[in-house]
Amino acid sequence: MSPSPFDLELPKTLLDRACAGDMAAFEQIYRRFERPVFSLAWRVLGNRESAQDVLHDAMLKVFQRIGQYRSDAPFWAWLRQIALNEALMRLRGSRHEWVDVDTHTLVDDTPEPSVRADAATLERALDRLPATTRSVLWLYHVEGYSHPEIAAAMGKTTSFSKSQLARGTARMRVLLDPATESVSCLIQTPQPG
Amino acid sequence: MSDPNTTTRLSLGDALRGLPLAAPDRDGWSTLAAQLTATPASRRPRRVWPLALAATILLAVFGTYKLRTPSVIVTHSVATVTPARASTPVNGEEHTHATTSTISDTTRLDALRTRSQSLERWLRQTAKSGSPLQGQDLAAATEIENLIGLVDVELSAATSAHASALWQRRVGLLEDLAVLRYSNYQLATGGKTVAANARID
């Protein structure tokens, strides 16, 4: 699996400068993590304006607390945790988006579908998922979180995470190939030629 | 050059990971920089700790016997290890102390993990049965969850020597969170609900 988009190595000197309150260092860190933070927030919330707010609030917390950062854990993981919590807090705030069902029966172990999709089709399908389901799908597949980690971040059970992943996968299957609703999804991805 | 008609089959995960990162619609750095300059970290007011303190006091006063997690509330004593018998030979004392210390550390770590798991279980159950937190309580809960997340990040890279302190910190934060939620939802002594940020005289 490819690494999380957050998995960016920062020079120790840059972190040291940031810990000392150097604004230029803050800006460099901001520029590097701006897109990963915004993307994560957008996938969780499904709203660009809210994602922009999360970017601001999360980065503010990061810089205000950078003195608490311990270098024995990767900086990107520390920053990502703050960004995710910030996004999930907003998701909880928008109550209608916070799916609170524990659908154990939806857990299945069928392999994930293979897909052919262009980015726009995939984006549209993601957009149509409930926010919680989309968040689980994104955290699991793109950020590489395990089910227990997702459950802990969302304050839910591992079964909840698994069932949301199964539900999201099934829904994507249908959205990407509504005609067949079969195991595979026929969508297109441009190939470098 | 790309040919949009050329397709390949990808796993759903690969397809999602292949999506480009989204860029924000506007540059937020200047706003952030202004805010950072206006409120340096060292002078930033800490809004969490008064709430956490209130939560801790509530736990001390009301919570212990009310929380329905009996196995986790009594685990402070688990770390105590039975002392060596009086008949232990003097020249065996050092060895006994070392062994006891190791057992004590392991037991303490196990106890903290158990307590952490039980608190998390209780928090999940409470979240299902109660109404969502609002306003200051929500902000405080989020702040505590943030701190728990940061401890988890540190735990993932911690040596065994530091693990115990981190687990202790995690349990402390979970207790704060438990009391915050508990006091908001279920502190119904005399039928009245008390918010965690309520003044305690």
Image (spheres, rainbow, N blue to C red):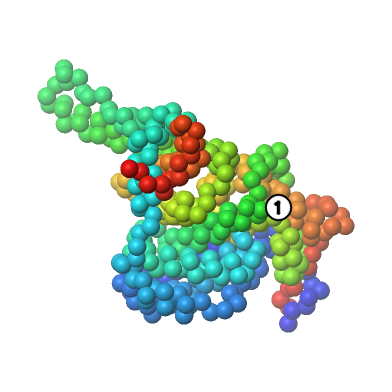
**Residue at image mark 1:** A168
Q: Nearer the viewer, residue A130 or B128?
A: B128
Residue at 71% in and 76% down? A192
- Please report, as a chain letter, where disc 1 is located: A
Q: Is residue A32 left or right of residue B40?
A: right
Residue A120 is drawn in which quadrant? Answer: bottom right
- The amino acid on which the numbered mark 1 sits, given as a three-letter code, is Gly
* Left or right, residue B102 beside residue B122: left
Residue at 35% over, 43% down: B200
Looking at the picture, tell me which residue is in the foreground, B189 or B144.
B189
Residue B163 shows in the view: no
| Residue B33 in sight | yes
At x 37%, y 76%, the residue is: B37
Q: Nearer the viewer, residue A18 or B35?
A: B35
Residue sitting farthest toward the left: B90
Mark 1 surroundings within 10 Å by alpha-carbon count, few (fewer than 14), some (14 through 19), many (20 or more): many
Residue A100: x percent and y percent? 64, 45
Question: For numbered disc 1, what is the local secondary structure?
Answer: helix
Vertical relation: A116 (above or below) B74: below
Number of numbered tags placed on the structure image: 1
- Residue in the picture at 62% in, 53% down: A95
Residue A143 on image: x %, y %: 57, 59
Identify whether B104 is placed above or below A153: above
What quarter of the picture does the C terminus of chain B occupy?
top left
Q: Image quarter for residue B48?
A: bottom left
Pick out the residue farthest to the bottom. Answer: B1
Q: Give above or below for B153 relative to A48.
A: above
Residue A170 location, x and y as percent?
75, 51
